[in-house]
Image (cartoon, helix red, strand yellow):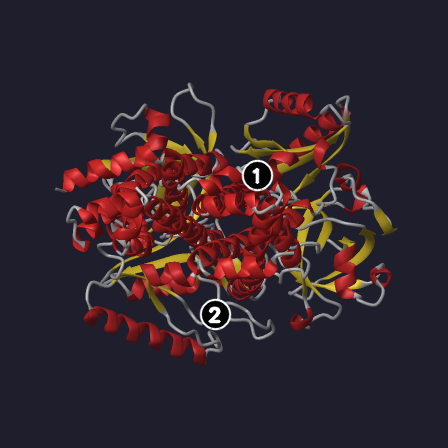
Amino acid sequence: MFMYYVRLAALSYRRNPILSSLMVLAVAVGVGAYMVVFTLNYVLGGDPIPHKSDQLYHIQFDYGDPDVADFEPPPQLAYRDAITMLEQSSDFRRAATSKFVAILEPPGNDLRPFFVNGRGSSADFFAMFDVPFQYGNGWDRAADDGQRQVVVLSQELNERLFGGADSVGETINMDGHVFTVIGVLDYWEPTPKFYDVNNGPIDTGEEAYIPWSLIAGQQLRRSGNTNCWAAPENSSFEAFLNAECAWVQFWVELPDSQSFDRYQTMVDNYVAEQRDFGRMQFPVEKRLYDVNEWMVYNEVQPDETRILSALAAMLLAVCLLNTVGLLLSKFLGKSGEIGVRQALGAGKGSLFIQHTIEAGFIGALGGVLGLGVAAIGLEGIKILLGPEAPTQWITINVTVIATTILLAIASTIIAGLYPIWRACNINPAIHLKTQ
Amino acid sequence: MELGPITRALLRNKLGVILIALQIAFTMTVIVNAVYIINDRAANMARPSGLDEANTFHISSIGYGNSFNESVVVDEDLNMIRQLPGVIDATVTNAIPVSGSGSSSGYGLEPGRRDTLVPAAIYRVDEHVLEAMDLDLVAGVPFTAQQIVRRTPTEERQVTETILSQAMAESLYPDDWRQALNQNIYGPDGSALRVVGIVDRLQAPWPTFTYVENSMLTPEITLDNSTTYLVRTEPGYRDELMVEVEERLATAPHQRILRNNQSLEYTRTESYRIDSLMTTILKVVIGTLMFITAMGIVGLAVFSINRRRKQIGTRRALGATRFSILRYFMTENLIISAAGVTLGAIMTVGFNMFLVQTFNMPRIDWFYAPIGMLALLLLGQLAVIGPARSAAAITPALATRSV
């Protein structure tokens, strides 16, 4: 019976091809546009590390400047606090991390020296964020403490330097310092770049990872955001490290509520102690943010995609209103046929099923076409984002495909409810008379 | 006018009217707010940086190794660049306007009053900056070669002069920005800078910075092995000079790498990439929406005409002209559209209030809603012309046939 109704729907489509195509087009555009925005929001507003986002916490301290009204505490840590937190968190996995830049002199004479963006991080970084390795491993805490000159390469950098071969044990020269390669990452480009959102959610990952202690050891140049709310005492690096300048990201992994409570107490005690010294005078709402809370707190989801969501929802509404009207025309246009079917014994129930399937049929066609619209839209956005931004995250995945088609069918049927009801309640006598 | 009969006829088909009116209302809400967002962004993107953007490029040189002496290399490079035919002038700078990265600080009129500091972008440049950036000095004098201080990042700062953008001078002296000339202004650490000049306009590097017009020039070169040159050329020479400068810098016998050889136009495109992306998406949305709505109006008009073919034939047979049939359907559409745009105006303002509250966007100008209403009324009329003409073409003889 289902297939019969689908055949009837196809027949009805052919009888009124322009009207029907218009409906399919409207559904496709509405749903397609909605899916483009949905995909952007799905990634940028989604959980970047679902299985442990509730175990990873970033600290927000009570930083503030008494002289500046509306001073927002910077979402990073000052060096001295990061050092203390590293010591006090040693029972847990934890990582202080920040960016650096360096000139890399490749081994051999084939390549000219080039500029790399790197990341200094504590040993636990790789385990905490499930960073995938192609070859070798990260380092251990002893390497952090000993400021050992070891490096983990990104897949891309390893490709560039060693042609993608297992380079563990090779050495590279960055800013005149020799580093031993101990690991090579697999492809890793999380979007949003949740472990460091200071330079925007869509940011290319670093190419080389070294123990963070080397940055404070001033072996390599710091980069990334730095926010000071008190001038350092003088121009020396030591004065900078001791100053009220936030530039370090700090994450800790707290596997259960017991450790969370313990950690919360430790952080609160530390703040109380610092407050007695005259620091951290500006209470913050909350000091420990898990990954998702941190994304919301840092407004990772761009205003643009949120505005577009609202606009896309209205676009979909217009398309569906359009569909209601067109379905109404179509169903009432074939009142004669409905009259005949009723006269031949079709009950309201079967008329209802028939027309629901007809609406669903149009919705399904619209959904398939909508996938095409979404694919074109996303491709266009990739082109417009330009060559500098990572765009691999903009893809149509299974969730999007399924959602698109379901959304198209469901919304067309919902839009069709009133027209269907009207179709089921046609008075057959009037329409039979004129035949 | 047959407003009475048209309205009564419409009331017999309330749902059709509501559908079209709602569609027009939503369309208007989206279109008007989208146009407003586009204009808002376009106005942002059109703000001049103060530089001769079409004829300017920049390139960075990063030295390495123990033999690299930045102080010597900078002089050598700048001499070479300034002597190239087609180059107007070049300066070294720590930041590029509109690039999105740079350095900022606060300055005020009294030392130690941190609450009065006015934020500004700091450009560390040499005495060629005015020519290289094409800045107009509206008061005071340029930097001299003797004022340029060279220092490593860990040496104490000794700069004593500054040139302000006029907007910065206005922030410090709201009554008369000219008063800023020859005054001392004080940084967060209490150090003083004397204002030797004021230029008409120079933007900070961050397009979204609240104080985007507040900039300061200081005569210094930071010796941290990383140098950026900003070069201004005669019109038409930029592209070939970009290649030539990079080649010459690369062949000079220094251990360094060159990066970010970009025209300022490219830098601007990159900085405003998200804005132009948003603008393009919104334009596509507007186009699509107008098309869909127009098609919806056509579809329903055709439907309602088809249902009334016999009545139309009867009216024609009773003496109505083709024009009065045309006018009937145009008027009908006008009534529906008027209801739609009235609701649309309310929704437009409502949605704009949402945007203002949630995203801190400026309020919509009053004339947007009326223009949007007119535009949609016009769209409705254009969409209905086709079906109305085919209605007018119905022959009076139709009245005599049974269907």
Residue occupying the far front of the picture: B400
Q: Is residue B57 left or right of residue A203?
A: right
- Which mark, residue A63? 2
How far is mark 2 from mark 1, CA to CA?
71 Å
Q: Is residue A108 left or right of residue B44?
A: left
Q: Where is mark 1, residue-wise? A: B389
Q: Is residue A95 left or right of residue A297?
A: left
Q: Examine the image and state in which quarter residue A111 appears.
A: top left
Residue drawn at 56 percent across, 34 percent down: B62
The amino acid marked with disc number 2 is: Tyr
Bin the neighbour count of mark 2 within 10 Å (Cα to Cα): few under 14, some 14-19, many 20 and up.
many
The amino acid marked with disc number 1 is: Arg
Image coords of residue A63 (percent x, y): 48, 70
Residue drawn at 68 percent across, 47 percent down: B124
Q: Examine the image and state in which quarter residue B382 appears.
A: top right
Q: Nearer the viewer, residue B312 or A338?
A: B312
Q: Are marks 2 and 1 on the same chain?
A: no
Bin the neighbour count of mark 1 within 10 Å (Cα to Cα): few under 14, some 14-19, many 20 and up.
some
Residue occupying the far bottom of the picture: A276
Residue B52 shows in the view:
yes
Image coords of residue B335 (percent x, y): 58, 57
Residue drawn at 39 percent across, 39 percent down: A19
